[in-house]
Image (cartoon, coloured by chain):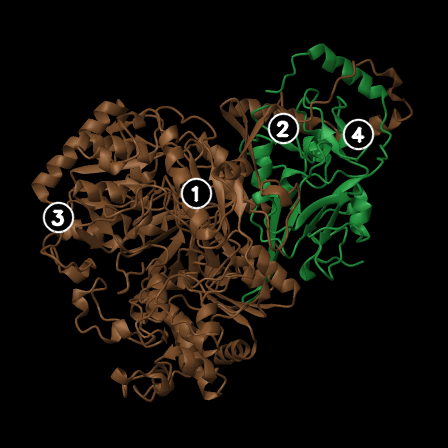
Chain colours: A brown, B green
Amino acid sequence: MSHDDRTHILGSALNVSRRGFIQGAAATGAATGLFRSVAPQEAKAFAYAPYPTDDELVTVPTSCAHNCGSRHMLVAHKKGDVIVRLSTDDGRYQGPEGGYGYDTEEVPQLRACLRGRSYRARLYSAERLLYPMVRVGARGEGKFKRASWDAALDYVAERMVHIKNEYGPQALLDQSYAGASYGVLHKSDQIEGLLGRFLGMFGCRTSSWSVPSYQATTFSSRMTFGTIEDGNEDDAFAHSKLIIMWGWNPAYTFHGGNTFYYMRLARQRGCRFVLIDPQYTDAASSYDAWWIPIRPATDAAMMAGMAYYIFTQNLQDQDFINRFTQGMDPGTMPDWARGQESFRDYILGTSDGTPKTPEWAAAICGVPATDIIKLADLYARTKPAALKASWAPGRNSNGEQYNRMAAALQAMTGNIGKLGGCAEGVGKGWHAEAVAYPYDEFANVWYASIKSDRWAHLVLNYPNLKREEIGLWPRGDHLDGVIPDIRGIFWQGSNWFNQLPHINKQIDAIKKLDLVVCNDSTITPSGLYADVLFPVATHFERHDVALPWYKGHYYIHRPKVIQPLGESKTDFQIYTELAWRLGFGDRYNPRATREYFHHDDAVDEAYLSAWWERVQHHQGVDISWDEFKTRGTYKFRLPRPHVAFRDQIEKGIPFQTPSGKIEILSTTLAQTTDFTRTAWGYPIPAIPKWVEPFESLNHTDKTAEHPFHMVTPHPRWRTHSIFHNIPWLRETYDQEVTINAADAAALGIATGDTVEVWNERGRIVLPAYVTERVMPGVCVVHEGPWLDLDADGVDRSGNPDFLTLDEPSPAGGFAYNTILVNMRKTDLNHRPGWDRIATSRSHVFRRGV
Amino acid sequence: MADNTDKTRIQVAIKERKRVGYTPVVPDTQLGFVHNNVDCIGCRACEIACKDKNGLPPGPRFRRVMYVEGGRFPDVFAYKVNMSCNHCAEPACLPTCPTGAIFKRQKDGIVDIDSTLCIGCRRCEAACPFGAPQFDPTTNTVSKCNMCVDEIDAGRKPYCVMGCMMRVLDIGPIDKIRDGTHPTKAIGPGDHTVRQVRNMANPDLTNPSIAFVPHPKGRVEG
């Protein structure tokens, strides 16, 4: 419909005299329906007809698949081979005890979020990739032509062999990630994924070891507890008396299927909530939290101030410290470190002469000392209390110190291993039986492994750099310390080109490569920079089982709901067929013949049913594979809420650390003499310490030019970059820069104004959202919009990773939240999406009071 | 485009409509919504569930989660008001419809639009104090929440309610919701519902079938 048509229709509607019409209707009010001569028909109630009701449709339980912090159930309602709508768990899919509406605290429904509910729009999106494509323009220009599978596969196989022969076993960079995520069979992942096994078996692979979301947190949990399984199950939150959400917004990032709901139950039972965050989040308002705004990247300092108060007021759980910790205070130092600095020494300043008082902390973090004291007192006296140290503050320069410091607070208050307490951290609450495809000595074989955000630095500076600059993982053979000469990149379930820091540097680097291969169901910004696009079947089009993500104890069956669209194939099919062409197809996929590329059902079924047998044996599941498939889901009933480290505390089982204790003093770090030989590359203190980030609002030399600290949290309406192309989601939220009202007034910016945000690395354009809900000096830009460059290299989508720095913290944590920027009102263009008609209307539904 | 090929039938309907007055239907049971403004995390899963269920293009939004915020840094507050069609006891949209496409069901008071009779004049859109009728530019018709009548008739609840991750949105007989006798997770222990919250049109206009657990800052006097 043209614009003129629409104006005309609108005009005629407006010309009707509403008042007169209502009077007319009232005047004839005495008449009755007897005179109606319209033949009675059944009212067509729906916006489009014919509307298929459920008795005309086949309903198939399945799940979401993307890499968020959760995993929920979806139910596909399909007509023929087309999904016409999705619903979610309604209680009917959990065996004999279930039924419509069944939803208890022990066995809650797994209700999908807005992203999951929009999957149909993604499945049938205009950006859906249906055929193999090969690049015909310059790299990044976005010009492709359709190719046959044969031609595309042959091309890739030939280039792979050439690159391996020419440049050695490190020349291909594996950048698979969890975008297509957690299926037990069709898995994309840095370590357990299908691509890693494929490239490793081929004998040419450089791996990317640091995890963008939470590497600092992973490091902290490993050093402190010896494991990343430091998480409680989500229902444990319902038992806390105090929940401190440190940089955590469970209204946006769902850690666990029902965490947010259990927190609601906690609030109903009298739990108090605190939020430490530069933003007053929706979680804060829902749980009526006490909001403590904090300068980004200064969290460890505030925690040190809390520890000072707790020690000096003698509020610590000394019995817990004595029994379970190493290095918390002089009394818990191991013999080999006797006399060295303990955490208490550091906090009280006995070792460095600087007591980490609340006043000292206040000057750094911007939180008044009185609030630091009040929170420390509240946390130390409330039992049980959950300090949930989330990942975002760890995504900073030296972010691992924040997570290590949080673990020290959790330990000194004795809140570890107890129901209602919390040791998170990473938050992995349950160890699923995770892998159905062959996972053997060929899995995760690599010849070099680097910090993930350093690849562009490596490619641009090769060979003139040191191993510590790229976080080269040590090896025990002749390849140790060999700087890889990267000539190609493979992406599986990954849009990393759009998501890693400092995109402009990546744009320079990718031009130097010889081969870029992208497996995806959707054309993404990364795909635009690829040489070959392999179309991948979505999780609706392949057979799999879904795992909960870190929290939640259940499996969800994911049948092949519909046939793959276009010529798309599963990743497993593509790598199997490539392996056949490279001579190791039978080893890569031992249950399959070469026929697998065309018919995968029987082989996938065989892998999955064999996997289910392992589930039955290892996890005591009593229903058969067929019964599981019929039900659609299996929810474990735990005898009591799972709490991490309960056995260590109640039964005295050692922690998985070298000392068997909670290592506030890390044995590994304390005994490392040459950090350049480690994957970290640079020194990391053995006890948690406040370490100055490379920039923050306290760096007055830098804030003169770039006065705002930008943080880049996960959005609610995307999973990283996934779903950016969904109009339903884009009309509910803007990609915008959130700024404080006082800052905005000074800059003459109002909500809805288009703003450019820049620093020395790049420039982005996006609308402003002006609010009192963010602290002055801080701005918020959610990560993940699809990059969209104008002729001058300005990003019109508002992707904050044009401004982030590819300078990881020593432990590998990405510094996504350590960015100083400037901003101003602009005439440059913002484009909310690649499509021309995209509009966002969220500001229409926002009202100030 | 809705299947409006039977132009004659529409003409007849318009003619007849002028003689047929509006006697408000008094339903056997009036169903209505209840929403907890405080506990809602504003995730909009209900909105997207609704868009998907009703196959809506970008533009029309049957259900709208409105974000309300205020205060001055750092003493701020925020809450959500979630509304679709309120299936009013005296719907303002109904008498404005020139074709009689809008009707109210006798058994449960659901207000709905017969999509085959809608001519897209948008009078109902202008009449509704709550913004419920939504114009769909792809069909040139107006449509709105019908409380998922197919689900209701099958003994289930609408998609928005069944999609609510926080269990803060529910339906039930509105009088029972109001007097607190309808069992629902939307209303927590100690919570009480109100007919109106701040920024919402006067409920006396149409007597909407909706109740809210209000945020303290969202309370209106009286």
Give the residue type at disc 4: Pro
Number of the label disc, if any, that sits on residue A552: none
Vertically, is B116 above or below A434? above
Instruction: Please state the horizontal and vertical placement of residue A348, each as a whole percent of the image.
Output: 38, 86
Nearer mark to the viewer, of 1 and 2: 1
Nearer mark to the viewer, of 1 and 4: 1
Tell me the element at label 2: helix
Q: Residues within 10 Å of mark 1 (few under 14, many from 20)?
A: many
The residue that disc 4 covers is: B95
Q: Residue at x 13, y 53 (%)?
A: A461
The residue that disc 1 covers is: A612
Vertically, is A303 above or below A603? below
Front residue of this view, candidates B179 and A607? A607
> Which of disc 2 and disc 1 is earlier in sequence?
2
Quadrant housing residue A12: top right
Q: Residue at x 26, y 56 (%)?
A: A806
Q: Residue at x 35, y 61 (%)?
A: A218
Nearer mark to the viewer, of 2 and 3: 2
Measure how far apart labels 2 and 3 are at the Cα level.
Answer: 57 Å
Measure how far apart labels 1 and 2 are at the Cα level.
Answer: 31 Å
Chain under numbered label 1: A
The residue furthest right is: A30
Vertically, is A115 above or below A350? above
